[in-house]
Image: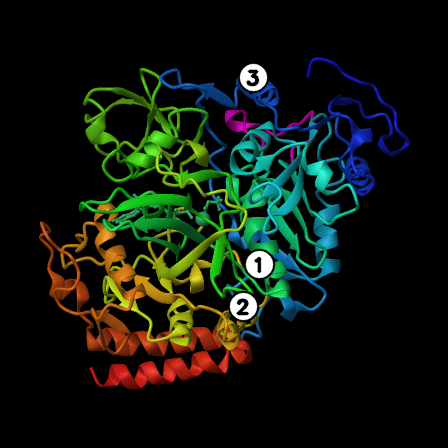
Amino acid sequence: FSEVHHVTIDKLGDVPIKRGNFQLLPSHVQTWLAQMIQLCTPRDIHICDGSDEEGEIATKLLVENGQLSPLKKYQNCYICLTDPRDVARVESKTFLITKDKFQSVPHSREGANCVLGLWKSPDEIKKDIDDRFPGCMRGRTFYVIPYSMGPMGSSLSKIGVEITDSAYVVLSMRVMTHVSSEIWKYLRNGEEFVRCLHSVGVPLPTTQSIVNNWPCNPEKTLVVHFPDSRKVMSFGSGYGGNSLLGKKCFALRIAGRIAYDEGWLAEHMLIMSVTNSQGEEKFIAAAFPSACGKTNLAMLTPAIPGYTVRCIGDDIAWMRFDKETGELRAINPEAGFFGVAPGTNMKTNPNAILTCLQNSIFTNVGETADGGFYWEGLEEETPAGTEITAWTGEKYKLGEDKTKKSSHPNARFCCPARQCPIIHDKWQDPAGLPISAIIFGGRRPEGVPLVIEAFNWTHGVFLAAQLKSESTAAAEHTGKRIMHDPFAMRPFVGYNFGKYIQHWLDFEKTPNNKLPKIFHVNWFRVDENKKFLWPGYGDNIRVLDWIIRRANNEDVAEPSAVGLLPKKGSLNLQGLNVDWDKLMALPKAYWVGDIDETLQWLDGQLGDDLPQAIREQIQKQKERVAQL
Ligand code: GTP
Ligand code: SPV
Ligand code: MN
């Protein structure tokens, strides 16, 4: 911010450029930026270059204006507290805009309230946009962030440019994506990019009271996607999933639509590898709904000897079947982890803790008196009596009052993936890594066994389509309700969900495709005292071991009404005290009710867009569970 160039370019009016050189940008980028500057009327412009210096400048600014406070126990780590009204994704204010409604959402039956995406017409959304964006950046800096989703220059990667008036977004995007002025090179011949516009929605000066120095506009929050023109507009929220537009908005909703058009997949999945004691390595992708265990599985520390786990990604996978080899190759389009903090500790996920001891941002967590982070789950690693400052500002002594909470349940750490002690050497391999198994799962306290293998690809797609999970704090849903979340993509799908399911089914039609086996797991089944029946975390390696043996076609599975289950004794339970029969039981009443409810829900949500193959799967399952 040292020097302010007053470059008056026709396109810019007289908005000064604080940093960067507008004239060096590709002309189609210039044209778009000029339009957005006219719309948002910012005070000045900063074109980001991704340099370390830029990170230092943005950090300093945020510390000075009270948005970040340094955690002196670590290097270059900061706490950020938000306005308590802006702590999670807002699914009810997230829309898909297409001329044809049914390109975005399925033909839900009358009376069924569609939850697989919200649609608005271009005319309707124009009113909402006109009511929000004109002048929205008055008095603020217009940051331009050029970034790559996926390794720089990989043919599987995609480019985006995000405009934002939030330095917190700049700093977070630098962690979560590949920000660099190199990007302009890739756009020099007018190449396409995803246009992202974000504003906190509080032009200055303002009469609104700003809580925690966190400007936001919860009454007017709106996250809008234009899948046809590959655009995103987000207003009023600074929270990750609403403001780091490369993540859910681009890498899942917009990329999902591009993937549909181009024949690949953009999924809410971690990518990991497991190597056994013979040195055989297998890559696995797994989809669980938000706050249901992707980060933890991706960085797992095996509880039994003989296995090495490596992490490639913890939230999003872009995957395509290789035309020549038929392998399903996956890349992680992100560069950082934006993970759930509560529950993370040196026992459950040491690799996550070790990843975020430097260069990280902690949002809505507590702080210890000696300048460390604190959240629920760190009790055993923090001396009793330690003074904690909660995210609410309240101070208390650890252990004195068990009702005190230090952190918001959706508090997050934001840290560079390269710092992960078990990051895979090839996590940036431009060719992607070959997936041998795909896992789906959710929080199912009742009825659902630890692991199920699909009979075949179509049955696997059905297992994914019927996915359900208890709601979590990652979005605005309150209470622990069991909600349908097909493919763990309910909040993230960018087009008609019926077409999405059909897209998955269709991969079977290409004979050359090596279809990975599909599995369903449940770490969250409880006993009559609501205690988890399965220890989870590092012990999940036991299930991965079984899954890999199945990927190698070992004879360790047997059919049941809901899929293939481990033969008794085939899962390594050495040293564990678990009630296998309870963990694997298939209560008839539960499953009979479940399949009826699933049919009713899928039929209500998707109507005639529900693929016939899924209806057939439901019918078959109905017949099988009747025999239980
Ligand atoms: P998003 O970032 O929201 O997409 O979530 P995620 O799927 O990456 O979830 P994450 O791994 O952060 O886990 C969320 C919560 O689930 C944390 O509080 C974890 O401690 C808890 N959790 C993760 N794995 C397990 C497990 O195997 N067993 C149990 N009981 N809890 C788990
Ligand atoms: C999720 O909610 O699934 C997340 C966090 O991974 S966010 O990026 O905020 O959506
Ligand atoms: Mn997620």
Where does label 1 land, which residue? 256
Identify the residue at horizontal 23%, vertical 77% (top origin). 560
Q: Does label 3 or label 1 sit earlier along the sequence? A: 3
Where does label 3 land, which residue? 60
User: Disc 3 and disc 1: Cα gap in Å?
Assistant: 36 Å
Q: Which mark is residue 479?
A: none
Q: Inspect this view and state whether residue 590 appears.
A: yes
Q: Does label 2 or label 3 sit earlier along the sequence? A: 3
Residue 189 is left or right of residue 563, and the answer is right
Q: Does label 1 or label 2 sit earlier along the sequence? A: 1
- Helix, strand or loop at disc 3? helix
User: Disc 2 and disc 3: Cα gap in Å?
Assistant: 44 Å
- Helix, strand or loop at disc 2? helix
| Quadrant of image for the C terminus | bottom left
Which mark's residue is nearer the viewer, 3 or 1? 1
Tell me if mark 3 has few (under 14), some (14-19) or many (20+) residues whose alpha carbon lies within 10 angstroms of its own: some
Residues in magenta, as a range? 201-215
Report the magenta stretch's main SS: loop
Q: Which mark is residue 500?
A: 2
Identify the residue at horizontal 56%, vertical 15% (top origin). 64
Asked if labels 2 and 1 touch by Cβ distance under 8 angstroms, the answer is yes
